[in-house]
Every structure is written in C-alpha cells, then in structure tokens.
Amino acid sequence: MNAATEARPSPRRQAAAPDFGPAGLDGSPAAARAAAARAARAAVESCPPVSPFAEPPAIPFFPGPRSGPAAARRFIVHVDIDAFFASVEVLLNPALRGLPVIVGGLPHERGVASTCSYEARRYGVHSGMALRTAYKLCPQAVFVRGNYHLYQSFSEKFFRVLRQATPDVEETSIDEAYLDFTRCRHLYPSFTEAARALQARIERETGLKVSVGVGPNKILAKLATKKAKPAGFFEIPPGGEEGFLRGLPIDSLPGIGPKTQVLLRMLAIQKIGDLWGLPRGTLHSIFGLGGDDIYLHSRGIDSRPIVTSTVPKSVSRETTFLEDLWDKRLLLAHLAYLCDRLTLALRQGHGYAHVIEVKARYADFRTEVRRRLLLTPLQEMGEIYRIAEELFLPLYHGTRLALRLVGVKASDLVRARPLPLFEAYSDKPERLGAAVDTVRGKYGFGAVLTVREKMLDAVYPFERDRGFVLKTASLTR
Ligand SMILES: [Mg+2]
C-alpha cells in the first residue's frame, strides 16, 4: 500500500471513492492506471469475500414483478447462424464441406475476411482480419468474394421462420436475433421444447446450422449462445445463473473492451465471479457509468425489452474501390450509384432522411465524414445526390491523397414527409420513385441509370437484377 493511501485513516471513505492520489500526478497514463489499480485493490481488500448469491446483495438478482401473471420468469431465446456467409457458400457448393472457407475476397486483394468457417478458425483466422494475414495463417483455405444479395435472401428466410414462432423478434444483425416467448405461453406447453423445435425448423428450412441460447433476459441468453456454439443448444435453468456466470471469462461480458480488461486483470479479476466482490461504487469510480453496467451484467441483471420495431435508425451504402481512386468523375459516379442504392432502400422502408452523411477514406486509411441536417426530410435520389456531392467535394479537394472508400448514409429516418406550410404539396418525388421501381422491376435494375452511374460500366461487371457488382457492398439494417 502506498504512502497516499496510508495517509487516509478511514477505510470506508477509501472504498466508496478511491483516491488516485499523488501517484498519478506525474500525468503519464501508465502511472494513473497503476494508481487506479492500487486504489481499487485497496478497496477490494477492505471488502470481505462475497458471493452475491449467498447473501442478499444491494440489488436482488433477476428482479421481476412480484405477483400477477407477469411475475413469471421471461423466456428469452437468442439465435445466431454459425459462420453465416461461409455456411451459405458450403451449402451451395458441397465440395467445400470440411474445408477452411474464408469469405470477403481473394488472398491477394485488399479488404478483410467477413466470415470464416470453423475449419478456418482453427488456424487462428477470424472475421475482420486482413485477407493477406488470413492467407499467411491458412494458405490452403478456399477464398470466396461473397455474394451479399444471396446472403440477404437467406437472412430473409431465417427471419420469416423466427416470426412464425413468436411475434416478439428483435433483429440485431443479418444473422442474429432475440425472441421473447413469454407472451406465447398458451401456445407452447414447454418453452424449451418450442425453442428446440425452432432450431430444428430453421435448419430444415434454410439448410443452415444455428446456435441457440436460452435465458431469462437478453444478456444471459446471448452468453448461453456463446456456450452453445457451434450448432448447439444451451439453456440456463432457473437457479443455474450463479454456476453459469461464475467461471466465464470477463471479456465475455459486453462492454468489457481491451482497456477495461487490462485494468481488471491488474486487480487479479479474470472471471465474472471475481467481479462480485467489487462494490458498485468502486466499479463506478473506476469506469464511470460503464462500471454500473459491469456491476449489473456480471450478476446477470438486464431489464432491456425486446425491440420489435422494424423502422431502421439509418441506412448506409459504402464501397471500397478495386484500387485507390483519384479521378473525380469516377468518384462521383460511385457516389451517385451508392445514392441510388440508398434511396431504393429508403423507398422500400418508407423512410425519409433528416440527416445525410458522406464518408471518405483516404489512401493512408484516414477517414473523414461530413454531414448535413435537413429541415425537410428527403427520399428522392436526385436531391440526396445533390447534397451528397456538395458534402463530398470539400473532402476531395481538401487532400492530395487518392481515396480507397466512399460511403453515404441517411439517418434520423421518419416514416412520412411533413406537409409544407408555405408551398403547394406535391407527391412528384414519390411518383417518380415508384415509376423507376416499376420499370426496374420489369426490365432489371440497369433499365434506369443516370449518365453519371453509367460511367461505372467501364469498371464493374453488371448483372440484370443486382446492378453493378461492387467490390464490397455493405449491408445495413
Ligand atoms: Mg453468426
């Protein structure tokens, strides 16, 4: 114990608010971290070892309504497709079965692996890894560029099956969802059987393996899925929460990133069970609001509801180029095409955007973003492109570097366009959009393109229904 903490006689005060003391005053982050760790350690040592399950803690575990029909424990199911993109590739080409498969690009290409099969993971390859690195680790892997439209159609089938089991489905990504079975208690004599039947049904109808985790809330269900992977089923039984959580590594909790992990490891905290000895005040004083989350999550407390709303928060489209680009006309052609795809998604989702944002990534990987708030929300391609171009040009002129990526994003979406106060209302933008969609539905996406977009003919292959096949098409929900 250092001089700073010895000088303070009251251990109670120490525990409530660890004082980082003069040790951190030299200003270096390492010294401040060490001081924080020492202070927290002192706080830990001043507390007797506790199991929050043995004695009633400050906040009860798994609090819920005390009486009435809602007093029942919630039944939350988390479903996640295993190695989604790679599994679709294997499904369509059975010759790949049992081989390491990496989706995202070819080994010599720029970009990252978006999914890899479990066989590839054995070599240390993981999603988000640069393709070249993946190739070094696993040169015998089969590299596939991937077809996002295809994955999207599998995803739609997956969610259709989920919605037949319960109306309370929350989509968290293209291949992952939470389901709440609690309201369906009159449909299912046994929730566990229903969840197992759902797993079998997804596998039967999509051909893809999924992992399923079951718990009384979202956080426990998701942790159960991690345990179930790959292709397994794991349910945390009532009363089994303590045993389940105790031995899990701390990084399995959401919100515990590398920095938090370093600090916790300095306190000799490796497992979730080790966290239970830390008072909430101590965690709060070290990590701020994040500390409160750690305190609650480590005890399996999570009252977040299932959010079934299908209105997306934002829609974005971006692409990395085949090689770095500096030609202004070609860059604007990409931007126009991305705006076209974006406004198509807005029309399909009946969304109007209050905020338009343009992103540029330069050859040195620096990323810049410009955004504009609109008084009247927009959906029409021409208007959105005009704003995107105005936002993009300063990004282009402000550098001498070539660009490796552009993107456009529409956010703060609303469902309806407000009526204008001082001008005549016109539904021309909607009618124009609908007309374009009708023609494209009949003759293919390429039937209506702007002159600017047509420039991409020289760069990318074109498919009748998909349009230009860009290097990386982003998918957002
Ligand atoms: Mg997955």
Image (tube, rainbow, N blue to C red):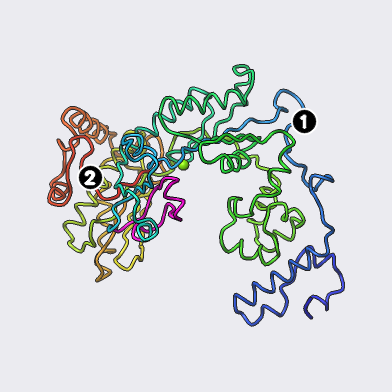
- Say which amino acid is labelled 1: Arg
Judged left or right of residue 246, residue 172 is left
Q: Which mark is residue 66?
A: 1
Q: Residue at x 64, y 54 (%)?
A: 250
Magenta stretch encompasses residue 14: no
Q: Secondary structure under badge 1?
A: loop
Q: Looking at the picture, how far across and down is residue 173, in whole percent?
A: 45, 41
- Residue type (three-letter) at the residue carrying disc 2: Val
**Which residue is depicted at the point 59% across and 42% down?**
227
Count of numbered circles in the view = 2
Q: Quadrant of the C terminus?
A: top left
Q: Which residue is mark 2?
A: 469
Residue at position x 33%, y 35% from top?
Answer: 94
Q: Is residue 196 left or right of residue 462?
A: right
Q: Residue furthest bottom?
A: 26
Q: Main secondary structure of the magenta part?
A: loop
Give the farthest residue toward the right: 9
Q: Nearer the viewer, residue 274 or 208?
A: 208
